[in-house]
Amino acid sequence: MSLRERMAEKLKLPKDLVMGAAVLTVTGRSEAYVENYRGIIEYTEQRIRLQTKTCQMTLCGNHLHIDYYTEDEMKISGEIGEIRYC
Amino acid sequence: MLTNIIKFLKGYVVIQLTGYSPERFLNLCSHHQIVLWGLRSTGNEYEMCISISGFKKLRPLVHKTRTKVVILERHGLPFVLYRYQNRKLFVVGALAGGILLYVMSLFIWNIHIEGNYSLSDQVILNYLESEQIVHGMAKSRIHGEEIEADLREHFTEITWTSAEVKGTRLIIHVQENEDVVLPDIPEDKPADLVASDSGRIVSMIVRSGTPTVSEGQEVQKGDVLVQSRVEILDDAGEIANVYYVHADADIVIQRTESYKASFPMEYSKKIYTGKKQTSYYMVLGTKRLNFQLPRTISYENSDDISSEYQCKITEHFYLPLIFGKCIRQEYVPTPSVYTKDEAVTKAKEENSVFFEKLRIKGLQIIENNVKIDISGGVCTASGSYIVEEAAVQEQTPEIIIPDQTEESDEERE
């Protein structure tokens, strides 16, 4: 466990702030909210690849749409098949 | 919902993006705080919505990422305004319409009266008009409580009122006291009962006061029937105390009246020739406009039957514009004589109309001895009839009443 992670644990600070971790909220399999990301690497109807501070996040599925897209938050809708980190 | 309204007000465009690296374009947009929404990828092309202000900042980004942007749709108020900028009068008209509607809603256009039985709408409306409560007055000048108080004060029959403004209507709810007996003298003041007509007393029920007459007695007009003075006698039969009360009694007086009516047997009968003319007219304020056919023949003797229609907005708001139709029927006056049967029927009719009027006044007809006689070209109905009536009225007693307060002072001394 890194020092930052331990500090966040002890001081009960939100980890997304301290560590810059991405927050992914998925509702069912049709909606996903992503916060704290860096940018889009790839966007097609079948695949959305996002760059976060520590890793890349890939959402695969069908008919993937980005409902809105701002610097700190985005909403993805469509048929989500898998979520992968690498 | 709110975001949709803001989007509409600020305006947005749907753009199509093509080129080498659209993802880079999207990232640059978010770095420059340009909000994008409704993104969809259709093969090599991307469609998205962008605000007008965001679209204006796109040029350097497009250049940097070597992509191509095409506007597909335009939405929102700025585009609507642009489209109608050469139609200023349309906008002026729409605004004027709105203002007119608002201004019109500041006035009362209908006065509605509810719950009145004996008082007609017109009577109440006339009174309200005298108090400057009229159709077309400003709503802000209406003070419900004042109207209510004025109505109750002016019409004693009204026991409860409520004035309510609903939209552009003034609704006045009224509740009337159904059997109003208006006493001339207030209930708390002493009063005698006197006969208002001469006759014989048939029945007498006294509730308060001292009766001075009895059933079966003949009385003259103005005679005191029930005195307001009530004497209290002591054991020796002397007056111990005197009270004055408001006399109250049901007294029925019977009297005999005579009836006489006559009409000549000869009369002029109207025989209609069947010829008639119809004309139309219009009354605007005090001016009358006639629309007549050019070839009008004037009749020597004619009856005019007019029917009018006054234009009105809402229930009671009449406009000074009347449309009318006038039918002129020609007749020839012919001298005729009533037959015996006709004359008797006519005389009987007249007689029953006369009695009906008495009945409406509250008189009860006990006996009718009217005979019809035809002689010398005249039909005469004459005879006597007996009626019963509560012919009683109140009167202030002649004696000056000592004040109750003085009496009590004396007692203390």
Image: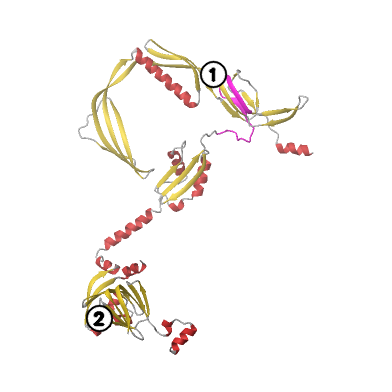
Q: Secondary structure at mark 2?
A: helix
Q: Tell me residue A72's x, y (percent).
A: 36, 79
Task: Residue lying at the far top in this picture: please name it.
Answer: B375
- Judge left or right: residue A24 versus residue B151: left
Q: Nearer the viewer, residue B87 or B33?
A: B33
Q: Position of residue B227 (x, y in %)?
A: 65, 27
Residue drawn at x 35%, y 58% as measured from the top left: B99
- In the rendered image, which residue does mark 1 sit on? B255
Q: Where's residue B307, x and y in %?
A: 31, 34
Q: Residues within 10 Å of mark 2 (few under 14, many from 20)?
A: many
Query: Is B40 placed above or below B336 here?
Result: below
Magenta region, residue range? B182-207
Tell me if residue B250 comes above or below residue B71 in the rendering: above
Residue B148: image location, x then y, percent: 50, 46
- Quadrant placement of the C terminus of chain B: top right
The three-letter amino acid code for the residue at tag 1 is Arg
Tag of residue B22? 2
